[in-house]
Each structure stands twice: as C-alpha cells, then as structure tokens.
C-alpha cells in the first residue's frame, strides 16, 4: 500500500501536476469545491460567458456541474484541505490493499502479494491514481463489494455478517452515486452471485441481502434528492441539459449526428480493448495472457469452488464491456477507463496465471536437473520470477512511453501557474485568459473557486467591452492578461 501511495503521489505531482487535463476533471473539481464549503450549489457568476467552464450549468439561479454527486462528495474532503489531488493516490493505495485481501481470501498469500504488486504497478492503475477522475473511487467500491460478498459467503457469525452486509450496501450505494452506468454493469454479476447465496441458504442470506438493499438504496437516493433541491425534479437528466444527445441507447437522438449504432458500439469497444490489451499490465498487446492463463488454471482444477472465483473476478469486467456498448462515446484518454472498475478481479486472475506459469517452469526445471537442491527456494523463485519479468517488461518497454503520453497532456502544464505566482506575489489578481479552447485556459481556470473569491480569479478575455465590465465588478484586484504563454498588464489587440 505504501508503494502504491508513493507511486500515485509521484504521478499526481510530476505527471498530471495536480491540475485537470480533461474537461470532466474541472467539472468534478468545481462541484467538489462547492461541497467543501458545505453548500449544494454556487450563485451564478456576474457573467456566465466570462467564467464558463465545461460541463457546468445554471439551473434556477444555481450553478452546478452535471455529474452525479458521489465522487465530488469525496473529492470535497481533499479540497477542504486544498489537497483534492491526493484523494486518488490514497484510494489507489486502499484499492491495492483490498486486492491483497481478496486474493488472500480466495487463494493464498503468494497470489495475494502478486496480485497487489501487479495492481500497483499496472500502467492503467498508475494513470488513474494520478487523475481527478472518478474511476479509482468506483473501483475501490467494487473491491469492497467483492470482499464483502466473500465474507458473507463464508462467515457464520450473525454480527459479523451484519457488518459485511452494511459494507456491501455502502459500496454499492456509493458506486451507483458515483457512476450509475458502471453501477448497473457491476450489479449484473453481483445479482447472480447474491441470488446464489439466497438459493443455498435463504434463512441466512435473506436478512443480509435486505440490509444491503436498504443501505444501497438510501445512499443512491441522495442523487434524486439533490436533483429535486436543485432543479425541482428528482429525475432531471443533467447530461442532456449540456448535450441533448448525451443519452444511453441506440438510434437517432442517442449520440451526435445520426445516432448511436451497434456497429459504432462494437468499433468503439474494439478500440478500447485494443488499448486495454497493453494498458492492463504494460505488456504490449498481450497483457491479457496472464488473465487467460489464470482462468485456464482455475478451470483445470475441475472443482466447483474453483469455478466460482472466475465469475466473481472476471464478471465485473465482462459486464462493463457489454453494458458500455449502449453508450455512444468511448474513453481512451487516461486509458480505456470505462472498464477500470473490473481491474481488481483481473489482477487476481493474472496473479493466478503467473503462479501457474511458475509452477510449470519449476516442473520443467526439476526434470532437467539431476539434483533438486532446495525445493522451497526453487518454488519461491518460480512463483515470483514471472512477476519480475512482467514488471521488467512493463517498466522498460511500455510504461515510460505511456507516462510521456500523459505528461503535459494536450499541452496543459503548471508552467503558467508557476509564472503567475511569481508575477502576482501576495496580490489578488484578476486574470483575463485569451483563447476559447479548453487547452488555452485549463490550468489557470483550475484556480477559480465557485464563488470567484480566491486569490486568483481567471476570466475569459472575450472582447474589450466585456473585459471592462468584469474589471468594474472586481475593482480591488490587480488585472493581468494571458495569451499564448505570455502575461501582460494590458490586453493584446482583439481580433
């Protein structure tokens, strides 16, 4: 966990540099800063066009972001201490720990250690832990739900079962509150798994499932309550208020242009899976091999108890791939992140596969040697040598290039922020940013608070008349202008 936390902090500080690079991230940050002040919304700015940020909207004189509130609620904890960037590295460390616990619960300490190391070293995982996106939180929720299911399936103590049913309910509730479509996908395999428990022992499982459902429903209900308070309706789709076509489904009106089609869905999934085949473990195009090997090793045991973990561990990933076919857009920046919540289970299957490969290698080695020597030492080496090879290939072949891809993504860096800090000293400034593209203003607008009362206030430099108006609204601030990497105290000519 310490290594995962350290790696996440390094990525967040030196690669993504604690600033948003995607429009989604600044919207999450905006809503988190609202929640960090104990509010549900901010008042509209003096000019909506001057302080426009992507995926934020004004409804009934309430300024909010379009996303569900689960992740901004947690991100707000970090923002309360001006450390929102640290939340995902911490979640990454906790998810690594959960991966170890699940691996040990199902298999043994060797598999658990291998799975945890694979998880923490995965390029896919490292990149997510350095962002401001919601996927690490939802992956942590899935890991907690998985461990809770395992404990409910195995422990007889009523009090302990009550605790684990509560954990399962909290995890599922926050997963739904964070990424509803992901929650729907994850629900599919877990409905089957919990139904199996209910079938096997209805008197024991029924109260647990009832507690799970009640807690999950209460947490998930926070979103429609929030929507009712903001919009007047618990069913308002904030996504479609930004883009009317941003809906789940197929046909005209679902996605831009002529609508979403099955052909487009399969093409998008293919592109995501192609990137996933390298991103998962850092083995270019063949990261799936250890997962397949682990699945095959479990199937080869031909025992019912060996079959169940396959569905538990692989089911979430398969369900995510299938369910996200109905959404019109894919995700490849920061990796195929719509599939990330299945990461923990795949890491455990991959660990089983590497252990099986090591066992085969040990058998071959013993057949070639006349004297076996220290069998225990040879066994330890055989178990961890495949892991070492995976880490060596990833760290030398794939990961460096992947990190370079994310470094200064879209040309967004902290450089203008550092330059501004030097220029302004202790003064409160009003900074007019020229350029309508996201990449022109991303870093500087990340300094804004929803109440426009921070030491740096960034505004779009639109035209001379609007600039004069905004200056009149904040006369106590020192005005600066930014364009194409240059700060000036007078505006450059307007086109």
Image (tube, rainbow, N blue to C red):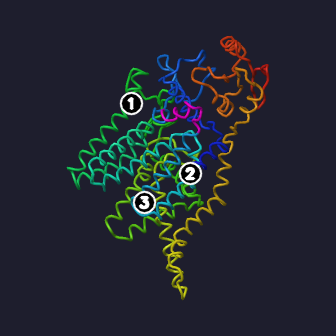
Q: CA distance from mark 1 to mark 3?
A: 34 Å
- In the rendered structure, the answer to whether residue 409 lies left or right of residue 92 reads right
Q: Which type of secondary structure does the marked residue at label 1 adopt?
A: helix
Residues at circles 2 and 1 in contact by the CB criterion of under 8 Å? no
The structure residue drawn at horizontal position 72% and vertical position 25%, both measured from the top left corner, is: 434
Q: Residue at x 46, y 28 (%)?
A: 238
Of the two numbered discs 2 and 3 on the same chain, state the one appearing first in sequence. 2
Q: Residue at x 33, y 64 (%)?
A: 305
Establish if 424 lies above or below 109: above
In the image, is 444 to the left or to the right of 419? left
Pinpoint residue 184: horizontal percent, then vertical percent. Answer: 38, 43
Going from N to C along the chain, the mark reached first, 1 or 3, is 3
On the image, which quarter does residue 220 sit in?
Answer: top left
* Residue indicated by mark 3: 104
Q: Which residue is mark 2?
A: 2
x and y percentages locating residue 3 in the rendered image: 58, 53
């Amino acid at each position: 966990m310490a290594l995962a936390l350290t790696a996440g902090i390094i990525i967040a500080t030196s690669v993504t540099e604690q600033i948003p690079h995607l429009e989604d991230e600044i919207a999450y940050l905006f809503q988190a800063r609202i929640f960090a002040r104990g509010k549900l919304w901010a008042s509209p700015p003096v000019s909506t066009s001057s302080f426009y940020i992507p995926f934020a909207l004004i409804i009934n004189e309430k300024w909010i972001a379009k996303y569900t509130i689960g992740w901004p609620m947690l991100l707000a904890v970090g923002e309360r201490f001006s450390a929102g960037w640290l939340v995902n590295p911490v979640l990454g460390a906790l998810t690594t720990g959960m991966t170890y616990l699940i691996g040990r619960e199902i298999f043994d300490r060797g598999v658990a250690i291998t799975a945890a190391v694979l998880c923490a070293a995965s390029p896919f995982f490292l990149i997510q832990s350095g962002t401001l996106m919601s996927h690490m939180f939802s992956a942590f929720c899935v890991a907690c739900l998985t461990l809770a299911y395992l404990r409910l399936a195995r422990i007889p103590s009523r009090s302990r079962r009550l605790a684990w049913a509560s954990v399962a309910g909290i995890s599922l509730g926050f997963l739904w509150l964070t990424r509803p479509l992901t929650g729907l996908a994850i629900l599919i395999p877990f409905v089957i798994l919990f139904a199996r428990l209910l079938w096997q022992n209805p008197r024991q499982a029924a109260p647990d499932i009832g507690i799970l459902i009640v807690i999950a429903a209460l947490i998930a209900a926070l979103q429609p309550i929030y929507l009712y308070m903001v919009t007047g309706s618990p069913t308002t789709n904030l996504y479609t208020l930004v883009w009317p076509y941003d809906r789940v489904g197929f046909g005209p009106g679902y996605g831009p242009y002529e609508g979403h089609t099955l052909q487009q869905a399969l093409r998008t999934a293919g592109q995501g899976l192609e990137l996933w085949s390298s991103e998962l473990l850092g083995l270019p195009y063949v990261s799936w091999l250890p997962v397949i090997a682990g699945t095959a090793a479990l199937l080869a045991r031909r025992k019912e108890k060996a079959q169940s973990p396959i569905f538990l561990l692989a089911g979430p990933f398969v369900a995510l791939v299938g369910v996200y076919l109905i959404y019109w857009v894919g995700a490849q920046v920061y990796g195929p992140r719509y599939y990330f919540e299945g990461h923990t289970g795949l890491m455990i299957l991959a660990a089983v596969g590497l252990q099986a490969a090591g066992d085969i290698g040990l058998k071959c080695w013993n057949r070639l040697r006349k004297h076996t020597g220290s069998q225990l030492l040879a066994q330890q080496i055989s178990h961890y040598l495949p892991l070492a090879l995976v880490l060596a290939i990833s760290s030398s072949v794939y990961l460096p290039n992947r990190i370079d891809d994310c470094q200064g993504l879209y040309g967004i860096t902290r450089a203008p922020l550092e330059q501004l800090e030097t220029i302004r000293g202790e003064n409160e400034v009003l900074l007019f940013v020229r350029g309508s593209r996201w990449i022109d203003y991303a870093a500087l607008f990340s300094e804004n608070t929803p109440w426009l009362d921070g030491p740096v206030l960034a505004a779009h430099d639109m035209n001379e008349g609007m600039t004069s108006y905004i200056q009149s609204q904040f006369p106590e601030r020192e005005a600066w202008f930014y364009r194409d990497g240059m700060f000036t105290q007078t505006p450059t000519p307007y086109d």
